[in-house]
Amino acid sequence: MESTRLSAKPLSIGDVAGQTGLSVHALRFYEREGLLVGPVQRTSGGRRRYSSLDVDWLLICVKLRESGMPLADLKRFAELVRQGPGNEAERLQLLEDHRQRVDAHMQALDECRSLITWKVGVYADHVARGKADGLWDPTRT
């Protein structure tokens, strides 16, 4: 019995844009840059036809890019996946390195949020007490 995913009807570039949140332009860029794991099928008229597996891969790519993975790393990851079995350790290392960068970024953002929360509290307190005049006023000496 054939998988439903593999037997699903091909998707147009517009369909894929809608499912992934990527623009048509971005999808063409991803293809041109070698970020897909397989070739995009074409109709006899040259129109792109994507599979549900293409969509699944693109959704992973979207999250990796949103989390700040450099384009070069995403290209390398896609290349490794295209090569097939035997390079899983290198794929793992790419993902581990990226996770460490994301963790460090999240920690830095958490520190920023803490400072902002403190500053909001300072301003809210002063405004509530009617004593906000002159808070960080560069015109006052």
Image (tube, rainbow, N blue to C red):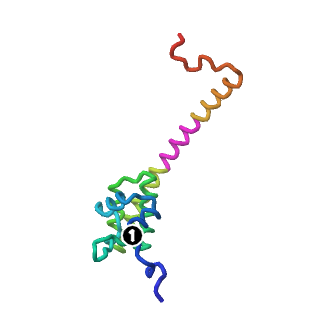
Q: Residue at position x 44%, y 50% from top? A: 101
Residue 52, above or below 135: below
106 or 67, which lies in front? Answer: 67
Q: Position of residue 30 (x, y in %)?
A: 34, 61
Q: Name the residue that disc number 1 marks.
A: 12
Q: Main secondary structure of the magenta part?
A: helix
Q: Position of residue 21 (x, y in %)?
A: 45, 59
Q: Could you tell whether 29 is left or right of 61 in the image?
A: left
Residue situated furthest right in the rendering: 129
Q: Residue at position x 50%, y 50% from top? A: 103
Q: Residue at position x 49%, y 81% from top? A: 4
Determine whether the residue tagged by mark 1 lies in a helix, strand or loop: loop
74 or 52, which lies in front? Answer: 52
Q: Mark 1 belongs to which amino acid?
A: Ser
At label 1, counting other C-alpha atoms closer than 10 Å, the crowd grade (few under 14, some 14-19, many 20 or more) is: some
Q: Could you tell whether 34 is left or right of 96 in the image?
A: left
Q: Please state the total of marks drawn on the protein image.
A: 1
Residue 131, above or below 28: above
Residue 106 belongs to magenta span: yes
Tell me where residue 32 sits by quadrant.
bottom left
Instruction: Tell me where the magenta segment starts and ends, as one range.
Output: 103-114
Residue situated furthest front in the rendering: 45
Residue situated furthest bottom in the rendering: 1
Residue 123 belongs to magenta span: no
Q: Could you tell whether 48 is left or right of 110 in the image?
A: left
Residue 1, above or below 111: below
Q: Position of residue 132 (x, y in %)?
A: 64, 20
Q: Position of residue 139 (x, y in %)?
A: 51, 14
124 or 15, which lies in front? Answer: 15
